[in-house]
Amino acid sequence: GAGVSQSPRYKVTKRGQDVALRCDPISGHVSLYWYRQALGQGPEFLTYFNYEAQQDKSGLPNDRFSAERPEGSISTLTIQRTEQRDSAMYRCASSLFSSMGQKNSYEQYFGPGTRLTVT
Amino acid sequence: AQSVTQLDSQVPVFEEAPVELRCNYSSSVSVYLFWYVQYPNQGLQLLLKYLSGSTLVKGINGFEAEFNKSQTSFHLRKPSVHISDTAEYFCAVSDTDKYIFGTGTRLKVLA
């Protein structure tokens, strides 16, 4: 079956512009995560959803970052007024389920990522 | 706060030699532990996970890892590596619904 897909794969934008990154999870997966990965670093948690409900957004760096998953499937991560420091790989992952506050035993399936470059 | 340390940023090793990639975590509570592999231009793929039970966990592609609670470690091993194992490897821990990843170890297998 199809894995997690992300679009666009590469995005170059000018400082101050808004960008929207899309994630299409594996069909039937309840939980969807967004991570940011800087060069030479591991993925850093941003936010996650169960169905359409945003469970945790503690990793979003500031209020320029927002995410939604209105129908419990596809999700969009939006960065407003982009800055050069926002340049990174943005990864999406999905899993069968994750209970808020409880240890997460389910495998997360990752998409190929969107490489964002802000010039 | 929970953290994961991967001390080796790069590990070069000759083909067919054994390898160990180190991972230490900081937590006084019970955790789940994971190793993921990232091939160039691809997403992360799960190699293996420890949830409970036997401390020796076997994964895909001949990899295994041993959970050591007293040393808070979860080192990844392979007895004989192949060129195709060249990739970046990430250790992750979960004591809540989130995963915390280490900074990764780049394994370079030399012919």
Image: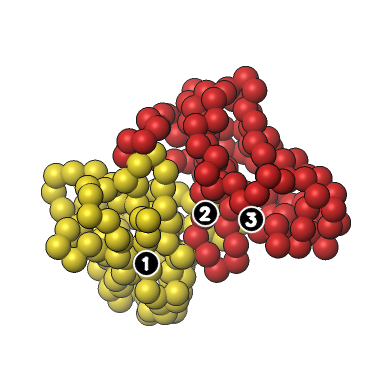
> Can you tell which of label 2 and label 3 is closer to the viewer?
2
Label 3 and label 1 in one chain: no
Residue in the picture at 84% in, 57% down: A15
Colour chain A appears in: red
Residue in the picture at 55% in, 40% down: A57
Question: Measured from the top left, where is residue A16 in percent x and y?
Answer: 85, 53
Whether residue A2 is visible, yes or no, is no
Residue ranking furthest to the front: A63
Q: Which residue is mark 1?
A: B5
Q: CA distance from mark 3 to mark 1?
A: 21 Å
- Quarter of the view holding residue A23: top right
Q: CA distance from mark 2 to mark 1?
A: 14 Å
Q: Residues within 10 Å of mark 2 (few under 14, many from 20)?
A: many
Q: Secondary structure at mark 1?
A: strand
In this picture, residue B57 sits left or right of residue A65: left
Q: Which residue is mark 2?
A: A44
